[in-house]
Amino acid sequence: MAKQAWIVFVFLCAVLLVAFFYIQLFPRDGEQPSARAGIANPASTNCIEMGGTLELVERAEGQFGLCHLPDGRVCDEWALFRDGNCATPE
C-alpha cells in the first residue's frame, strides 16, 4: 500500500511540474510574459553618469553603443568606460 501511495505522489508531482512549466512557457492570450530583470550595462551607466546620452548603432558586423557627451564628443561607450578614452568608432 505504501508503494502505491509513493507512485501516486510522484505522478501528481510530475503533473504539477509539467503544468507549471507549460503555463510559464505558453501564457494565455492577452497575457504578456513577465519581464526578466537584468543587470545594467556598465558602459551605458558610465555614459549616463557623465551626463551623456546613448545611441545604439547597428551595422553588418554587429551592434554597438555611442555616448554623446555634453561637450559634443561622440565616443564608443566601452572605450570610454574601459580607459576613459574617447575613441570614435569608424
Image (spheres, rainbow, N blue to C red):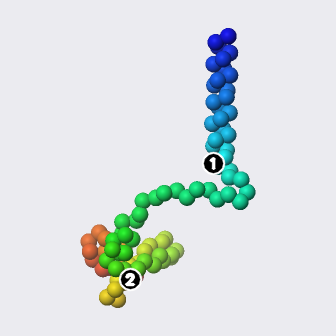
Q: Tag count in the figure?
A: 2
* Marker disc for residue 74: none
x and y, in percent, of residue 56 in the image:
47, 76
Considering only vertical position in the picture, is 6 above or below 66? above
Label 2 amino acid? His
Q: Callout 2: few (<14), some (14-19), or many (20+) C-alpha neighbours within 10 Å?
A: many
Q: Tell me the quarter of the picture where residue 9 sits.
A: top right
Quarter the C terminus occupies: bottom left
Callout 1 amino acid: Gln
What is the secondary structure assignment of the residue under circle 2? strand
Q: Residue at x 26, y 74 (%)?
A: 84
Marks 1 and 2 in Cβ contact (< 8 Å)? no
Residue 68 lies in what quarter of the image? bottom left
What is the x, y in percent for residue 12? Answer: 67, 28
Q: Nearer the viewer, mark 1 or mark 2?
A: 1
Q: Is residue 83 visible?
A: yes
The residue under label 2 is: 68
Where does the image place residue 73, in percent across and percent down from the top left? Answer: 34, 86
In the rendered image, residue 37, in percent from the top left (x then y), is placed at: 48, 57
Which residue lies at the image location 43% right of the left edge and 74% below the top edge? 65
Residue occupying image coordinates x 48% and y 77%: 57
User: Can you say which quadrant of the picture contains the N terminus?
Assistant: top right
In the picture, the disc for residue 24 is 1
Residue situated in front as seen by the camera: 84 or 36: 36
Disc on the earlier residue, 1 or 2: 1
Disc 1 and disc 2: Cα gap in Å?
40 Å
User: Is residue 6 depicted above or below 32 in this figure?
Assistant: above
